[in-house]
Amino acid sequence: MHNRHFYIEAELCQEHKAMQNVCGDACESRKLKEEDRLITVLSDGLGSGVKANILATMTTSMALQFTAKNDPLERTSEFIMKALPVDSKRQISYSTFSILDINCFGDASLVEFDNPPVLIYRRGRFVIPDQSVKTISRSDGMDAKVLYSKVELKKEDRIIMVSDGITQSGMGNIHTPFGWGIDGLKTFIQQNIQSNPNISARQLARKIMQRAKTNDKGSFTDDASCQVIYCREPRKLVLASGPPYYKNCDKELAERIDSFQGKKIICGGTTSKIISRELKRDIAIELNNYKPDLPPVAEMSGIDLITEGILTLGKVSAILENISNNTVKGTGPAEQMVRMFLDSDSILILAGTQINNAHQDPNLPVELEIRRNVIKKIASILEEKFFKTIEIEYL
Amino acid sequence: MQAKTKYKVEICCGTMCYIMGGADLHLLNDYLPAALRQLVSIEGAPCFGNCDTHEKIHPCVRINGVELPNASTRKIVDKLIILENNDLL
């Protein structure tokens, strides 16, 4: 998800009630790339287990679809209330929801119904947006109060959406007879961000979850979900691979890398030689850390990683294709590169298009693909699987 | 940084040399005779730029600045022994 003003990181942490197999909360985010929008819906179904899960999942998918199609939020919430099935025991149809819709300008619209309030953290305190209340009459006779608000997000803002499993955790304990409460949660968030101002959305969500679980003595008494959204300066990375087609572009390439703000990777023997020549910096290759599958990494001041070209790129593409969660094991050159990719939000690839004639011999023992194709493949995986913003520039 | 040694072996770490057998050369240190080990320093080097010739010269190695084409562990060790013997004469 990219935004003209900042990058939005959205991470979810969820756990189900002890002794249940399914989580009765549902939370889903969707990134609409064409419109540069992010929609997140968190819903808590009545009760727990499969029935709650169905109610919550229905709510989230309806809310997501309607919001994505730009239906008015009022109509969406009304429709959801009317469409949900009625519980046979309690005679009520019930699921809570919070809908968050962030557009390309960083304006967020919020719709809340019966969930703990959505928290917006900005520079040490919580922002309370102007809310308008609308009452929707429901088929079961109970009127529902739905809260609407709008907020203009700023860089370094964090939005925290939780289900009541978090705020009610620890209920009945001596210190928290009424549960952790929204105030307890607020203090916890403030403390955590103050002690680690760059805490990622993922880390914060996990920390809140762990604390709530401790409140409940290690087994949740209700389904708990925590979605954290963090608007931050994008972490940038540049990858230069391949010599430029025209020799007079060499200097430009070296200068662009040198002046780039962020992490820098050079991939390719000839490319690193060009940059070393243009910037007048030496390359040192360490042989002692010998890994038999790929040529060793090199070092140059000001560059974070220098590797061999096509073989390493091929391995990177294979690793990216196969990993399922965001963790990579190993310390080889390809693994290092993958880790750097995953730790960045926006990646610029400077792809040189000069073809290495030496690699075009069909008698070679190894298949050497054309760099452009491998780079295209890596870019599309990073974009589709890991939601990175990729820009490829051919030189 | 190592102290200056008598023989400096630079191994090309370019793609071509690497797939044409250069990978094995990185273990050169294990094959050096004990007498030579103290005298030789082994370093990696960026591609020498010989790839684009139409002759089979990979993998490339430089010993004290002199290129040794089609290198193998055996060839390098032999060359070093010859150099050392000539020097002793």
Image (cartoon, helix red, strand yellow):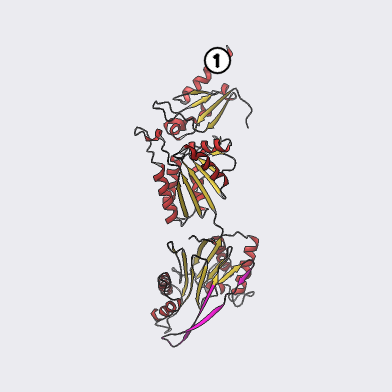
Q: Quadrant of residue A213?
A: bottom right
Residue interval drawn in magenta: A123-150
Q: Is residue A143 visible?
A: yes
Mark 1 — residue? B85
Of residue A104 and residue B10, the one placed in the foreground of this image is A104
- Residue A311 in the image, given as x and y percentages of width and height: 43, 40
Q: Is residue A381 magenta?
A: no
- Residue B34 in the image, given as x and y percentages of width and height: 56, 23
- Residue A7 in the image, given as x and y percentages of width and height: 52, 60
As helix, strand or loop, the secondary structure at mark 1 comes to helix
- Residue at image position (47%, 73%) is A43
Of residue A244 and residue B17, the one placed in the foreground of this image is A244
The chain ID associated with circle 1 is B
Where A217 falls versus B33 (above or below)? Answer: below
Where A1 falls versus A262 (above or below)? Answer: below
Mainly helix, strand or loop, the magenta region?
strand
Of residue B51 and residue A146, the one placed in the foreground of this image is B51
Of residue A169 and residue A291, the one placed in the foreground of this image is A291
Q: Is residue A126 magenta?
A: yes
- Residue A288 in the image, given as x and y percentages of width and height: 55, 35
